[in-house]
């Protein structure tokens, strides 16, 4: 089944699209069903009000202007039925001499562990480097999150450092590893895979 017209980027099993108000009920239910999966890793919007705030920041009109957006939210959807399997957010997009952004992500139950996030991350990188024309993306991961570290390592990111007490999640300041990928490294890895 081909990806719908709303797809920004499509792969074989997953496509990325922007979140929208019509997603509220299903999204909030999926986040609540994923509470154990998300535990201390992420604080996803688990109420309609928080999802509304998320939409305003990551899917508002300014997020659609690739040349000057500072945030872009992307839902990873399964191609066969459109089910939302995960979320990818590009934030703190800085232009000028920097051309960089942070990527945050999380899977949604019951779709975790099925390879959808690996394809979703590849598509997010394509969106970041081709559509947004960024030079660098950075992903910060708690050291104990082995699945997330495996995900970014598999996508070709390089561990660049360690940030102590970097982000406050679930009421605690948590250490994070810094992983990054440059546009030229991404292009070269795609050439080698052909």
Image (tube, grey):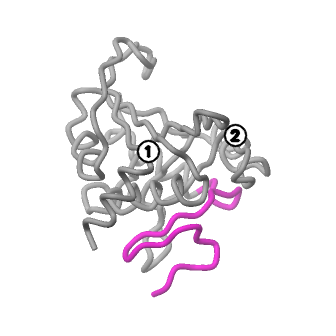
| Residue 174 higher or lower than 125, as above or below | above
| The stretch drawn in magenta includes residue 23 | yes
Towards the viewer: 145 or 51: 145
| The image quarter in which residue 23 lies | bottom right
Q: Earlier in the sequence, mark 1 or mark 2?
A: 2
Q: Which numbered disc covers residue 3?
A: none
Give the distance between the C-alpha atoms of the residues marked 1 and 2, in whole angstroms.
15 Å
Mark 2 nearby-residue class (10 Å; few <14, some 14–19, many ≥20): some
Residue at 67% x, 35% y is 96
Image location (x, y in percent) of residue 192:
25, 65
| The stretch drawn in magenta includes residue 183 | no
**Could you say whether the residue bearing mark 1 is in a helix, strand or loop?**
strand
| Residue 14 higher or lower than 151, as above or below | below
Residue 21 falls left or right of residue 2: right
Towards the viewer: 170 or 7: 7
Residue 173 falls left or right of residue 191: right
Q: Which residue is mark 2?
A: 57
Residue at 33% x, 58% y is 188
Extent of the magenta region: 1-25
Q: Which numbered disc covers residue 105?
A: 1
| Residue 177 higher or lower than 90, as above or below | above
Residue at 35% x, 56% y is 117
Image location (x, y in percent) of residue 111:
33, 60
| The image quarter in which residue 12 lies | bottom left
């Amino acid at each position: 089944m081909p990806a719908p017209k709303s797809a920004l980027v499509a792969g074989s099993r997953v496509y990325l699209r922007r979140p929208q108000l019509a997603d509220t009920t299903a999204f909030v239910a999926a986040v609540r069903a994923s509470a154990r999966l998300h535990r201390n890793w992420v604080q996803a919007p688990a109420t309609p009000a928080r999802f509304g705030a998320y939409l305003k920041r990551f899917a508002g009109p300014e997020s659609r202007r690739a040349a000057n957006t500072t945030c872009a939210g992307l839902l990873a959807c399964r191609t066969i039925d459109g089910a939302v399997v995960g979320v990818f957010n590009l934030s703190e997009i800085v232009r000028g001499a920097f051309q960089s952004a942070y990527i945050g992500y999380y899977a949604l139950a019951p779709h975790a562990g099925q390879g959808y996030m690996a394809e979703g991350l590849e598509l997010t990188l394509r969106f970041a480097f081709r559509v947004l024309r960024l030079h660098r993306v950075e992903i910060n991961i708690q050291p104990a999150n082995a699945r997330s570290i495996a995900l970014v390592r598999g996508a070709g990111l390089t561990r660049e450092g360690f940030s102590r007490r970097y982000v406050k999640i679930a009421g605690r300041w948590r250490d994070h590893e810094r992983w990054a990928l440059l546009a030229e490294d991404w292009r070269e890895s795609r050439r080698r895979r052909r």
